[in-house]
Image (spheres, rainbow, N blue to C red):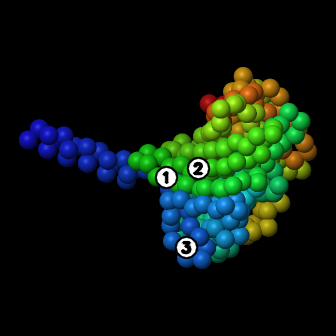
């Protein structure tokens, strides 16, 4: 009888957690729109054939995707109000939808690593996670969080080949998302991460935090809206920061694992809708 009571309690607790879980995942091929847990490609490039150009995750505040291509950048989908949107709108609500309160793709990653994207550093320059022998996208929804992974296999690096796994986790009730990079190799590597920016944006920098706020030159949204992006990191994990004119690059110490946090907000939100408010939130 006691075992049955414990089992029932566990089932009720699990059901409550699922009901309160405001996170979700999305991964599908555009040809059939069927949700999948994992998709692989030996070419490493499904950018034009996979839904929203790569795996995606969301919580109530924002959605994030990793481009399924040599870019492997992390891009942002911004929301006007806290709700889940990926399954219904698949990253691209119509102009009418946006005017009625749905979110939009205001962020522009371009050729940069976007918001917290991961690449490698060979001692002199950035190395993209390409070419590969295989690239795999995977998404998982847990009771209180959701995450996506991108595994790039056999990336040429310093005369060898390495496998790099990037995982992005979003949490219910938490605007910040965790970005983890893993070098699946015997020897440590130097990772590169950071945040991109555009001309005219406000920039805020201090030890462990870089933020940008302003308009992105995006052309798929119904209107132009200010977007905030931020990356939070442990300065002790990095050897230098570079500004190449389009992004702030953080070069890590040799490591097999690296963790940073990213966050975003937009001008359409009711509360965090200015740079001042965004920085206030980040520095709580």
Q: Are marks 2 and 1 in contact (CB under 8 Å)?
A: yes
Rounded to the nearest whole Å, what is the CA distance between mark 3 and mark 1? 17 Å
Please tell me whether residue 78 is drawn above or below residue 259 in the rendered image: below
**Left or right of 219 in this view: 279:** left
Please tell me the numbered disc located at residue 149: 2
SS label for mark 1: strand
Quarter of the C terminus within the rendering: top right
Which label's residue is closer to the chain start, 2 or 1? Answer: 1
Q: Which residue is identified by label 1?
A: 140
Q: Horizontal and vertical percent for residue 232?
A: 69, 34
| Marks 3 and 2 close (CB-CB < 8 Å) | no
> Which of the marked residues, 3 or 1, is nearer the chain's N terminus?
3
Residue 104 visible in the displayed image: no
Instruction: Please tell me which residue is depicted at 38% across the width and 51% down the height of the picture.
Output: 18
Against 223, residue 201 (above or below) is: above
x and y percentages locating residue 167 in the rendered image: 60, 45
User: Residue 182, labelled with which disc?
Assistant: none
**Which residue position is annotated with label 3?**
33
Q: Nearer the viewer, residue 97 or 15?
A: 15
Mark 3 to mark 2: distance in Å?
A: 19 Å
Asked where in the image residue 54 lies, by quadrant, the reply is bottom right
**As drawn, which residue projects farthest toward the front?**
159
- Mark 2 surroundings: few (<14), some (14-19) or many (≥20) residues within 10 A: many
Secondary structure type for disc 2 = strand
**In the image, is residue 100 above or below residue 106?**
below
The structure residue drawn at horizontal position 69% and vertical position 31%, both measured from the top left corner, is: 187
Question: 92 or 98, which is in the foreground?
Answer: 92
Residue found 20% across the figure and 44% down from its top: 7
The answer to whether marks 3 and 1 mark residues whose Cβ atoms lie closer than 8 Å is no
């Amino acid at each position: 009888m006691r075992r049955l009571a414990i089992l029932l309690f566990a089932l009720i607790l699990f059901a409550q957690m699922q009901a309160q879980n405001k996170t979700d995942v999305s991964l599908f091929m555009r040809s059939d729109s069927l949700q999948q847990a994992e998709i692989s490609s030996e070419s490493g490039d499904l950018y034009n054939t996979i839904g929203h150009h790569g795996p995606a995750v969301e919580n109530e505040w924002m959605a994030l995707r990793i481009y399924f291509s040599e870019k492997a950048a992390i891009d942002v989908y911004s929301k006007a109000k806290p709700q889940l949107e990926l399954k219904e709108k698949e990253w691209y609500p119509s102009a009418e939808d946006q005017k009625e309160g749905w979110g939009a793709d205001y962020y522009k990653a371009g050729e940069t690593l976007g918001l917290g994207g991961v690449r490698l550093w060979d001692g002199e320059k950035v190395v993209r996670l390409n070419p590969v022998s295989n690239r795999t996208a995977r998404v998982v929804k847990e009771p209180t969080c959701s995450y996506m992974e991108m595994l790039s296999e056999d990336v040429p690096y310093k005369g060898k080949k390495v496998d790099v796994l990037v995982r992005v986790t979003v949490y219910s009730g938490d605007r910040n998302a965790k970005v983890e990079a893993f070098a699946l190799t015997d020897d440590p590597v130097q990772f590169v991460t950071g945040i991109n920016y555009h001309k005219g944006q406000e920039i805020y920098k201090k030890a462990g935090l870089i933020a940008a706020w302003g308009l992105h030159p995006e052309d798929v949204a119904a209107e132009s809206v200010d977007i905030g992006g931020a990356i939070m990191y442990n300065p002790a994990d990095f050897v230098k920061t570079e500004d190449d004119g389009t992004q702030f690059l953080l070069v890590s110490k040799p490591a097999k694992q690296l963790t940073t946090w990213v966050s975003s907000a937009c001008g359409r939100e009711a509360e965090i809708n200015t740079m001042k408010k965004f920085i206030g939130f980040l520095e709580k």
